[in-house]
């Protein structure tokens, strides 16, 4: 149970156009759009955009009538799962301002901000910052505040702010019953009794209210005024990142797909921020229409981090070379992350992060050449020179314990050479190894000079053969 504290202040974020935003928010709006419900005998408009409303389209209207008024109207079936995902995205944005976030109803998120004002400024400043943040991510919201969470939900619908219980009571008494989003039967009962404000209802004796209107309405008002504690189930971002995106219209256009990825990367960036995680690799699965085979995109970062702009650049490079079997209708994104996030440190005087140039270059090369197109070298625990290294991922650091001189360039295979054409300068270094894998050798290595003065790495082999061989170049 949640007890109402005098120090509490809840901010409500109400998105009345959430059904429309959930379905059409992934692609830039180019004309009149709407969402419709398919229940009943015929489909009816659930919500319509401003452009559609300007053409006469209204909620509750038959879809056929709406298309008659606006032939250019594009309408899609209302998607409840996408609405839930959009509401959780709104909660994720609010979570950056407070750890107490509640999904109040299908289109409202509540966030407790009393403890966040020291960090984000006073109530007005915090509300303005959060409102700007959610609008930047495509949500048109109304905000309202109150010391009681149930009241903040009501205030958000009307865009009202009540910083204390006194102002809340004064505001509630002046509101019409429709402000509570009551069932139609309750509204008709209140109107039938001539009650035009909630203040008139509250003036009735409690027993009389319950007898005439039932206990549900009275309990609802008790919750709003903080007279009855309610259980609050706080929302938290998931521990692992996963995002499903169903495109409003299937497309193979690179610009449109990049627009969708930009929205997804913004969502991922906020999740990384609130979970204090660093991205290692983003995995995207593109599902195509007409039974086309799914296409996978794996975009990795050379250094774990939260580089949104670089990630979008890499996605753009991947999309340029992508051959789609059919237009994409759905995306599924997952992420490999690490909790050891270390923000990049910038230069003290210039403010630029010079140390990030090398990982950025590696990321671009990976995106253009593929994961197998670029590699690095790492030492291996073997005395035989040709087996003392391995291919590894670029940027991987390893400790080299060998301190004796080694050539800058090792030949792919040792090449026979003449002893009388060499002048031995340093050596011998005996290398005898490999008995355990059937490739044992016994060699004496020397640093020598040829007739041109170049320093070479040569050896005299005793096993399995015998003779002199050139193995590497010390001076290129």
Image (spheres, rainbow, N blue to C red):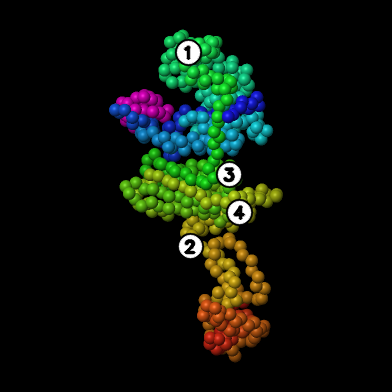
Quadrant containing the C terminus in the rendered view: bottom right
164 sits left or right of 264 in the view = right
**Distance in Å between CA atoms under marks 1 and 2:** 76 Å
Which element is circle 2 on?
loop
State the residue at coordinates (62%, 20%): 165
Q: Residue furthest top?
A: 194
Q: Are marks 3 and 1 in contact (CB under 8 Å)?
A: no
Q: Which residues lie in the magenta part? A: 43-72
Label total for image: 4
449 sits left or right of 189 in the view = right
**Distance in Å between CA atoms under marks 3 and 4:** 23 Å
State which tag comes first along the sequence, 1 or 4: 1
**Distance in Å between CA atoms under marks 2 and 3:** 31 Å
Judging by the rendered image, the residue that carries numbered circle 4 is 356
Which element is circle 3 on?
helix
Judging by the rendered image, the residue that carries numbered circle 1 is 211
On whether residue 67 falls in the magenta region, the answer is: yes
Question: Which is in the foreground here, disc 1 or disc 2?
Answer: 1
Q: Position of residue 232 (x, y in %)?
A: 55, 31
**Distance in Å between CA atoms under marks 4 and 2:** 22 Å
Q: Residue furthest bottom?
A: 420
Q: Residues within 10 Å of mark 4 (few under 14, many from 20)?
A: some
Question: Which is in the foreground here, disc 3 or disc 1?
Answer: 1
């Amino acid at each position: 149970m949640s007890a109402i504290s005098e120090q509490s202040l809840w901010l409500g974020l109400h998105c009345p156009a959430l059904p429309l935003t959930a379905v059409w928010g992934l692609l830039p709006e180019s004309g009149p759009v709407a969402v419709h419900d398919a229940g009943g005998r015929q489909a009816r408009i659930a919500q319509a955009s401003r452009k559609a409303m300007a053409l006469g389209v209204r909620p509750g209207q038959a879809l056929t009538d709406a298309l008659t008024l606006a032939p250019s109207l594009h309408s899609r079936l209302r998607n409840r799962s996408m609405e839930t995902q959009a509401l959780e995205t709104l909660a994720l944005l609010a979570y950056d301002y407070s750890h107490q976030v509640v999904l109040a109803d299908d289109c409202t998120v509540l966030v407790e901000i009393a403890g966040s004002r020291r960090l984000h400024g006073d109530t007005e400043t915090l509300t303005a910052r959060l409102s700007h943040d959610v609008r930047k991510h495509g949500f048109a919201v109304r905000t309202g505040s109150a010391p009681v969470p149930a009241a903040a939900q009501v205030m958000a619908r009307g865009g009202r702010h009540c910083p204390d219980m006194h102002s809340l009571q004064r505001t509630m008494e002046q509101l019409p019953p429709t402000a509570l989003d009551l069932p139609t039967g309750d509204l008709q009962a209140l109107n039938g009794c001539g009650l035009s404000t909630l203040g008139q209802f509250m003036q009735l004796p409690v027993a009389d209210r319950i007898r005439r209107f039932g206990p549900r309405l009275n309990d609802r008002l008790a919750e709003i005024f903080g007279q009855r504690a309610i259980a609050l189930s706080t929302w938290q971002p998931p521990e692992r990142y996963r995002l499903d995106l169903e495109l409003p219209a299937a497309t193979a256009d690179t610009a449109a797909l990049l627009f969708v990825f930009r929205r997804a990367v913004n969502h991922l960036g906020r999740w990384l921020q609130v979970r204090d995680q660093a991205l290692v690799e983003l995995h995207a699965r593109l599902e195509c229409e007409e039974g086309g085979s799914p296409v996978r995109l794996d975009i990795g970062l050379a250094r774990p981090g939260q580089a949104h702009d670089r990630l979008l650049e890499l996605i753009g490079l991947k999309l340029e070379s992508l051959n789609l079997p059919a237009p994409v209708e759905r995306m599924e994104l997952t992420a490999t992350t690490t909790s050891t996030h270390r923000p990049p440190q910038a230069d003290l005087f210039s403010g630029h992060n010079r140390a990030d140039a090398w990982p950025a270059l590696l990321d671009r090369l990976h995106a253009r050449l593929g994961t197998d197109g670029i590699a690095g070298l790492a030492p291996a625990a073997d005395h035989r020179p040709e087996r003392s290294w391995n291919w590894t991922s670029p940027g991987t650091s390893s400790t080299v314990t060998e301190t004796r001189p080694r050539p800058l360039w090792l030949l792919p295979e040792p090449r026979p050479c003449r002893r009388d054409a060499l002048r031995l300068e340093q050596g011998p270094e005996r290398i005898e190894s490999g008995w355990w894998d059937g490739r044992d050798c016994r060699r004496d290595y020397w640093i020598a000079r040829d007739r041109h003065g170049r320093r070479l790495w040569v050896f005299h082999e005793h096993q399995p053969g015998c003779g002199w061989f050139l193995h590497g170049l010390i001076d290129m």
